Image (cartoon, grey):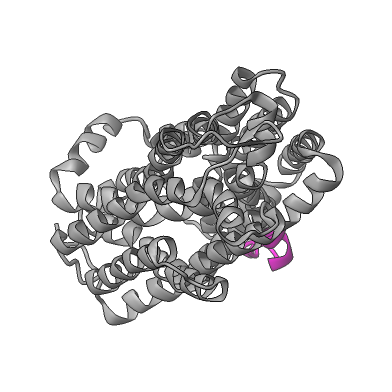
Amino acid sequence: MVGGQAKAYPPLWLSWLVWGLGALFYLVGFYQRVAPAVITRELMSQFGLSAAALGNLSAYYFYAYVAMQIPTGVLADLWGPRRLLCAGALVAGAGSLLFGLAPSLGWAELGRLLIGGAVAVAWVALLKLAGHWFSTRRLATITGMGLLVGVIGAVTAGAPLRLVVDLFGWRPVMAATGVLTLALALAIWLVIRDDPSQRGWSSHTPPQDTKDVSHGILAGVVHIWRYPNTALLFVASGGLVGPVLTFAGLWGVPYLCQRYGLHPAEAALICSVLMISWAAGSPLLGGLSDRLVRRKPIFLAGAVVVLLGWLIMLYLPGLPLGAFVGVSVVTGLATGGMIITFAWSKESVPAHLGGTVSGAANMGVMLGPTLLQPLTGWLLDLNWGGQMAQGARIYDLSAFQVSFIPMVAWALVAVVLVGLARESHCQQIV
């Protein structure tokens, strides 16, 4: 109370500024996730990499990202989003500098590992900021905008990044990314506050009793696997997201250059279209699921379309480039059905385990590219015909088709597993 009157909520411009800085760090995470796709030739030439080694280098991001998912939820409660975002941006900036200046493969791998572990904190921290700085009736919109901002980062790491790399080289660009991320860390520390009350405004989140957030964490992690939907959706979501981030995030550019004779910037643009379609499909299919009060039909239909889409794009002989792009748009939109994973998983376990199962669900989502990126590279090496260009290996179309089989197989598994999952009708079923 101030002068007998309740303090007002923060002005929208301030809420957007606080949230926007957190969203910028989320954008950085998506950018770093996809960036290796447009510099595959440079990385292979610089470090003398095979496809398997390149896939492993890119996947170091995902190794750390997946490992940090459940700890991030605990750290967000212990430290608050301000400290978590600032620390994440500092480490990510240092990792990007290390990656850009790496004298050897080992240093480059460490850089990617630092980046992946650091940006893993962005999404949970962003959700916490939204809950404190915005009214609950805006949260669905804010969440959707967060995903949109992230995909803008992925698009930036497509054709725009390729053009800048062509002008300045990949090392200066990655180093500059690190410097900008460090500057963002400073801005986060100066501007962001965990709650509006720290700026003299009323909070949109009611006061809560302080609890030991570490109590029962391990027990909760074990408990969620007693409910079949947890494991079914954990694996199925990886079968939808894995192919998109394996293709658009690493191997799509060299594949499209080989198949259609495109310039890397043109191929990167097509991969960006796939990512944008994925971003658009998430709120569309998630909203449709809410309106129909059903989870399973939308998710299952999306999984079937994803499977058919990849089969057509990768294995239909004589597919024109225009048709490839059209099918990729439909496939990307259908991949957006994976957003249902989070609501469906939370509805499939006791309510008090909602946060734990959300972290596990996000691990499942990212498990797809974590395994598929290096596996695809390993298979490419097994089917390499010995061709080289500017110090980098060149893989023919047949090698790519064999190497993409695990992507399609996982999508098929996803269809089966979603079919086995229990419908929740948008409410707690346990």
Residue 139 visible (yes or no): no
In percent of width and height, residue 256 lies at: 57, 57
Q: Quadrant of residue 392?
A: top right
Q: Which residues are magenta?
A: 2-17
Name the residue rendered at 66%, 59% in the picture. 262
> In the figure, 253 relative to 9: above or below?
above
Q: Total of numbered circles in the picture? A: 0
> In the figure, 36 relative to 141: above or below?
above
Q: Is residue 73 left or right of residue 266?
A: left
The C terminus sits in image quarter: bottom left
> In the figure, 296 relative to 80: above or below?
below
Foreground residue among 28 and 301: 301
Foreground residue among 321 and 138: 321
Farthest bottom residue in view = 292
Foreground residue among 146 and 264: 264
Is residue 201 rendered magenta in the image? no
Is residue 5 rendered magenta in the image? yes
> In the figure, 73 relative to 415: above or below?
above
Magenta span dominant secondary structure: loop
The N terminus sits in image quarter: bottom right
In percent of width and height, residue 181 lies at: 73, 39
Name the residue rendered at 33%, 68% in the picture. 308
Foreground residue among 38 and 320: 320
Q: Is residue 428 left or right of residue 260?
A: left
Name the residue rendered at 18%, 39% in the picture. 223
In percent of width and height, residue 298 lies at: 29, 73
In percent of width and height, residue 2 lies at: 67, 58
Q: Is residue 393 left or right of residue 162?
A: left
Residue 389 visible (yes or no): yes
